[in-house]
Every structure is written in structure tokens, then in C-alpha cells.
Amino acid sequence: MKLKPALTALSLLLPLSSLAGKATVIPPVAEKKAVEDAYHDTQVQDPYRWMESSSDPKVQEWTQGQNQYTRSMLDKLPGRDAIRQRVTELLTWQSPAHFALTKVGSTLFAMKSQPPKQQPMLVTLGSLNDTTSERVLVDPMAVDPSGKTAIDFFVPSPDGKRVAVSLSKDGTESGDVSIYDVTTGQALPNEVVPRVNGGTAGGSLAWTGDGKGYFYTRYPRGTERAAEDMNFYQQVYYHAVGTPTEKDTYALGKDFPRIAMSSLDTSHDGKYIINRVANGDGGEFMLYLYGPSGQWQQVSRFEDKVVAARFGHDGALYLKSLKDAPRGKLLRLPLSTPSLGKATVVVPEGKATLMGFLPTQGRIYITEQLGGPSQLRSVDLKGQDLGLVPTLPVSTVGGLESESGDDILFANSSYVEPMAWYRYSAKDGKVTKTALAQTSPADFSDIEVIRAEATSKDGTKVPLTILKPKGVKLNGTNPTLLTGYGGFNISITPGFNKLSRAWLEQGGVIAIANLRGGSEFGEEWHANGSLTKKQNVFDDFYACAKLLVDQKYTQPKKLAIQGGSNGGLLMGAALTQHPEAYGAVVARVGIYDMLRVEQTPNGQFNTTEYGTVKNPEQFQALYAYSPYHHVKDGTKYPPVMFTSGANDPRVDPFHSRKMVARMQAATGGKGRIFLRAAGGGHGMGTPLSDRIEEEVDVYAFVFNELGIKYQPVKQVSSPKAK
């Protein structure tokens, strides 16, 4: 056995501080190797292709050297100890957060995040007004004391006596499902179905009405597929509880696309199951229905533009459709005649964008997007408007769950108000905050929330939310942090981030951009920021940065930008297209080589959002903005910190390696270009302690690069953990 490569790989998983040395450290220079590809008669050089192999000892050695260089810089930054104390205090604030609330019978199931525990746990409650009724059902720390095992999802059985739980390790998102007895809290023996969840196509399951088994998403096993296909061809199988998984039976999916992703759900009476099948990440879906006949029936195809479905209590399936309605309309389809031609419009397209919906006994509750913030309203089963449900200003509404009759539970939070669960009484129209409410480690009443609009290159108005301490003067000198995402139909909505206090209390300004590519204004807004129109996203972001400077919030050398994943791509495009506009950049787990992204498993799912190099027009669009290919020698780039995760199933860490190598070469090793390569994944399942370490590094880096002298803050006592 050759130990050197194994030991090198192991060193990458150690805490980064252990790699720091006292001597002056310089970044290792990545060797250039001649590689040339031809794309539709265009020749493209790729001198760092060799860095794509994470198992290559030379790649591991280079990565270790980069980590040493990064640590040698980060560990000596001024104010770091005080920053660590504040970040730790904020992130370990012992006010629990409950999410993914699900009610079955009289039992409430929820995920609970309770610092300083490393991972959220699954709990049950008898009442939202009495937290003493809470009981821990599955604690990942009890399963794995290292803190590296996380719950991917859970699904209670129809009678609430059992719950299926997917657990994955080390940020891989590769989850195995176990069944837990709700009364005893014990896992059923010999009851594990492997790899139901994955980092590419996700995972899902739906119980049958009798609770004797469930349909689930199954990835290829053993030698069923070639090695390069093991993260694709997801199908639906049936598992009978108490039988070996080898005896599970095929149900659906042999004819699905290679990049299909299934999401399953059971009707309230247990007689029906729906499967919403996504065609990769681009926003196309088809729908299948399983009923009393024991057969699966296709209800809609990709071209029908049905993008969401929920069961009603009135023998109907309610559908969100984008057909001739880019902001969404709501349809009702009788389960007795499940042909899309039989569907009728209940709620036509309106000015707001239809996001989520929840049918109850006599109403339908609808969450609507308003360019970032959302609202909640209700209609009767015929679509007659019953008015808005009172919510916080400039806030996000989500997690709709039926309680009884037409009463519902929902989560609500804003930039300055922590998340809480509320009960809405349909009879008297009253909203009551429940006992499941977070507290804040600081008073945010000193923060202003300002909604602004920037004008993009093509004249499009782009919403921007600005948070600033009251009394901060618009004199162009304020340290400002701008973030954005712009992709995959994901809206950037208001949310309470206790860590933002560490920035705001230093006199900093925070700006959040609602870019095209998201769903803030419906499918048209998304489409104009995807595929060959992706450049619009980067133009929108630059327009927001320019507004912050023009309106004297800040100046380029005081403006930091941050984004992750698709937002990491945004950072790469921003710093290569407008390097003069920013004072510091934090690019987390991002995509930078747009010509090679589809060579990775999850990258192939992304082709319906980004496009493919196989299509000439899409190739030209990808090549035109691909950050890696637009780094220019001799350009003065702002300081950049790139982060990556060794086990990331969504974005291969080679993107960060190649981008860092190219930028360090372009700046002759004189630029402040850093790689923070850790051992986790894309972010899901990251232990709390690892998150604290990363945020300390990020804040220390940005404060230093913007010339902010950190002022220590008086410590606040945390509430007792419950």
C-alpha cells in the first residue's frame, strides 16, 4: 500500500489551522500543461486540465500548499480573536429554530436546530404552545458523535406511528433511509434502504396509505449501470417494510431522462401518490399519478408547464401551471378524471407571482412573490379572494401546514425579525405567534430596511434590499457587503441572519440583489437569466453595485461581494468583468469553468439551466462569460477568497482549484488570491463548528481587505437551551 497519497488526502480533511506554519509561506505555482479543445471550430486552451483529478497526488500536494498559504495569511489578521469570539457567540446563540413542520394526526414533527449541537435533529411535539411536550426522535449526534452525519429528509407514515429518515455523512448528501418507531424512538432492525438521496438528483419517498411500505427514489446499484452513470437514471421503486431491499420492486422511471429527479407525495386519504419528475435543474416537470387501480398514469408532460401539485381535501389535485401564465395560475383537477384536459382554472394569473399553495377543507392559501418579499392570501375553493393574511413587513412566508379545518400554521421572518411559527384562525382572521419562535442575540431595531431599484444594462429594473444602521451617513465611505444568486428559479427572500449583526454593528451596510434567473417575477424573469441569457444576471449585479456607489453608500474599494454555488459563478463573472468595481470577493463553492461543468455528474443536471457546449449557440454564450476563460494576465484583481469542499456532490472542487491557479498566474503571484479547501460538501450537513471556522475566516478576510479595524462588542448572555 502506498501511504503518501493517502496521508496527503487525509491532511486535507484536518482542521485548516493545523496546516499553518510560522515561516513565510508562498503559494505553490501550478504547472501549465498544453491542452487544447475544439468546440464548433473554436480552439480553447485549458492549461490546468490536470487539476481536475482530486485523487492525483500532485493535485493534493498543490491543494495542501494552497491551504498552508491561506492559513499563513488568515491566522495573523488583526482582530481575529475578537472576531472569533463574536462569530461564535452569534452562531451558538441558544435559541432553537424549528423547520420542516409536518402534522400527522395530533402529532407535530419538525427539524430542530439547537446550538451548540452540531446538527439539526428530528423532534415531535404535542402542541406548538407547549415546548415541554417536545421529544427528540432522531439526533444525528447520537448516531454519529463526530457531528458529520446529517438528516437529509424525513417522512412520517400516514398513521404517524413510524417515520422514514434519510441520513448522510461528510456532506456527501448520499443518504440511506431507516425507519424509526415514533413511540420508542428506536430504528427498526434490518430496515435500511441504501442511497435513496443523492447530491445530484436528490431523493424522496411516499408511504402507501396502509403504512406497510413506501415508494422511493432509487439510484443504480452494483453493476446495473456503468460507473459514470451511477448518479443518474433515478427510478421509483416500492419497498415493503420488513423485507430485504433486494426484493424491492420497480414501479416507474425506465423511460425518464437520464437527469430526471423525482419528488413523491401521498394524498390525505392515502389512496393516491403523485410523482413530480424534473428534467434536470432547468424548471421543466412532468407529473404521474398512482391510484387505487395500482397503476401509474401520466398527468402532464414537460411541455404542459405544470410545475407543482398538491392534494386537496375535496377529491381533487391542485396544480400550479405556467402555461400562458409566466407568473403562474392555479388549476383544479378531479382525481376521478385525472386528464389534464379536465382541469379548470381556480386562480388565474395575477400581478404577483404564484409561489406556493396549500388547499384546506374550504380554502386555498397562496404565497405570492413580490420581487423578493412575499405575501400570504387565501381564496375559497372557487377562487374567490378572501384577503391577505397579516404578516411582517418586507418578509418571507413559508412552511404552510394545515392544522385543522381551514386553520393553518406558517413560518414568517424578515431581515430584522427572527423566524417564528404562527397560527392563523380562519374564523376570526387572527394571527397568533406560537411558542416556536426564535429570539435574537441583538436588537435589530437600529437597522433600516430600504427597498431600491437599480437599472440594468438593457433597462430592466432590478430590486435591491439595503440594510444599514440608522444614522449611517451616505458619504461614500461605508464598508458594504453585496450578495446575489440569480439562477435556478430560486428567489432571494428576506430572512433573519443573526450573523449579519457582526457586519452591521461595525457600521457596515448589507445589500441583497434580486437578480434575473430567480423567480421573483415569474418564469419570464427566470428565463431571462438562464441559458443564452445568463449574461443578464451579471449585468444586473453590476448595476446594483453601481447604484451603491452612485448613491454614496460606498465606493469600490469599500465594497465587498459574496456568493455561493451559482452565486459563486456570479462572483467569478463579476470579478473578471469588472475587477475595478470591488474591494474584496468571497466566492464559495462556485462554478468557474463553464465549458467543463457538464463533465461532472451534477453539472449534467445543470445543462437545462446553463446550457451545453454541444449546442453551438449555448457554447458561445457559456464561453463568453466563463470566468476561468476570462482571467487576463496583468489585470489588477481585487483580493479573492475561494472556498471548496472535498466531498461536494454539486460543484466539483476542481473549479476553485483551476480558477485560483489561473488567477495567481495572471497576477504573477502578487495578487491576494486565496483558496480555502475544506473536507466537507456543498454546505448541507456542515457541522456547526466547521461553519464557525469558515465564517471567522471570511469576516476576518473581508474586514482586513476593506481596511476595517474591528471593534470588539460586549458579549450578550444566551438563553438557556431547551
Image: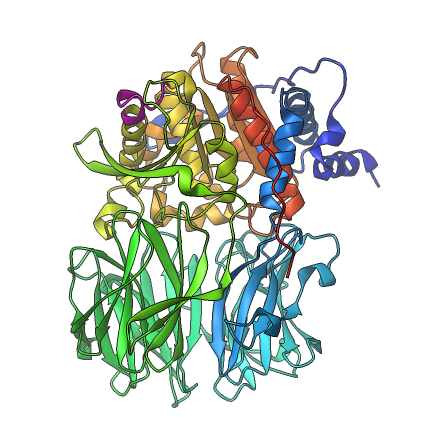
Residue 49 visible in image: no
- What's drawn in magenta, residue-wise? 547-555
When the figure is inspected, residue 10 is found, relative to residue 222, above or below; the finding is: above
> Position of 400 compared to 436: left or right?
left
- Position of the C terminus by quadrant: bottom right
Query: Residue 328, located in which quarter of the rendered image?
Result: bottom left
Q: How many numbered marks are there?
A: 0
Give the x, y percent position of residue 161.
59, 83
Q: Nearer the viewer, residue 137 or 535?
A: 137
Query: Residue 407, located in which quarter of the rendered image?
Result: bottom left
> Position of 45 compared to 27: left or right?
left
When the figure is inspected, residue 673 is found, relative to residue 485, above or below; the finding is: above
Residue 449 visible in image: yes
Q: How is the image coloured?
A: rainbow
Give me the residue at 53% from left, 14% from top: 671
Q: Nearer the viewer, residue 313 or 713?
A: 713
Give me the residue at 31% from left, 27% from top: 542
Asked if residue 552 is among those painted magenta in the image, a careful observer would answer yes
Give me the residue at 53% from left, 55% from top: 229
Give the x, y percent position of residue 37.
44, 29
Give the x, y percent position of residue 63.
65, 29
Give the x, y percent position of residue 268.
40, 83
Give me the residue at 47% from left, 43% from top: 443
Query: Residue 316, located in which quarter of the rendered image?
Result: bottom left
- Position of the N terminus by quadrant: top right
> Position of 15 compared to 497: left or right?
right
Asked if residue 164 is among those painted magenta in the image, a careful observer would answer no
Q: Nearer the viewer, residue 191 or 222?
A: 191
